[in-house]
Amino acid sequence: LQNEPALTDTDILEKKLQAVGPNAYVDYCFWGGLVDYNFDKLPGLDQAGCVAFKSFIGPVSPDYVTLNIGQARNALQILQGCGARAGFHCEDYSIIKWEEKRQQEQGNNTWQGFLDSRPLIAEYVATQNILSLARETGAKVHICHVSHPDVAQLIREAKREGVDVTGETCSHYLAFTEVDVLRHGSIFKCAPPLRSPADRERLWEYVADGTLSC
């Protein structure tokens, strides 16, 4: 969805289908981009075959756009109308940007500084906000790349309440930890960042019981 040009309208979708289709050896599908300038394009993208829509609540690379919570609410109201699901990278933009600034002002350009700039609370608050919007709007949401069991617990509780939410984690959160970041640097850099060994072990419980379904 994000490689240039971002998949934000049906013309771009058609061009990507033409590029990928003749070269595909496996089944594939497209997520649509969910950015602040294509809300009016979302129903058309859904009709054209996008299986879901991806948005970032936290910082993202310059070729994409971060949504604030008000914009996310508006988008979910639109997507609820066509029964489409929205996936969110859940890290709070304001917490991360403030913590990055603090680390830089302290001259802490270390891997510990990176970890400290993306604390668990940023992921937790953003996930909580998206789940609250899903409750209010009745929209379908997907929480992308959950890194911590406390965040998975929010998803478990929302599922029990009847919120239409799915969640995923990634193999690196189940295999590696912040220790690997501190020892080996950029090859273990991801966002949200890797967590503690104890957090890694607890995260497996939410895979085992289906809270994190992929």
Image (cartoon, rainbow, N blue to C red):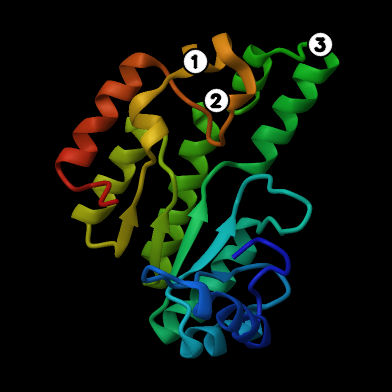
On residue 188, the disc is 2
Location of mark 1 (residue) = 180
Which element is circle 3 on? loop
Label pair 3/1, CB-CB below 8 angstroms: no
In this image, 104 relative to 122: left or right?
right
In this image, 180 relative to 108: left or right?
left
Which element is circle 2 on? helix
Count of residue discs:
3
Which element is circle 1 on? helix
Q: Residues within 10 Å of mark 3 (few under 14, many from 20)?
A: few
Q: Which quarter of the figure is the N terminus placed in?
A: bottom right
Observer-nearest of 4 and 40: 4
Vertically, is 9 above or below 186?
below
Q: Position of residue 33 (x, y in %)?
A: 60, 69
Residue that protrudes farthest toward the left in the picture: 209
Mark 2 and mark 1 lie on one chain; the one further toward the N terminus is 1
Q: CA distance from mark 3 to mark 1?
A: 24 Å
Q: CA distance from mark 3 to mark 2?
A: 23 Å
Q: Quadrant of residue 64?
A: bottom right
For the point 54% across and 63% down, the residue is 54
Observer-nearest of 100 and 207: 207
Q: Residues within 10 Å of mark 2 (few under 14, many from 20)?
A: some
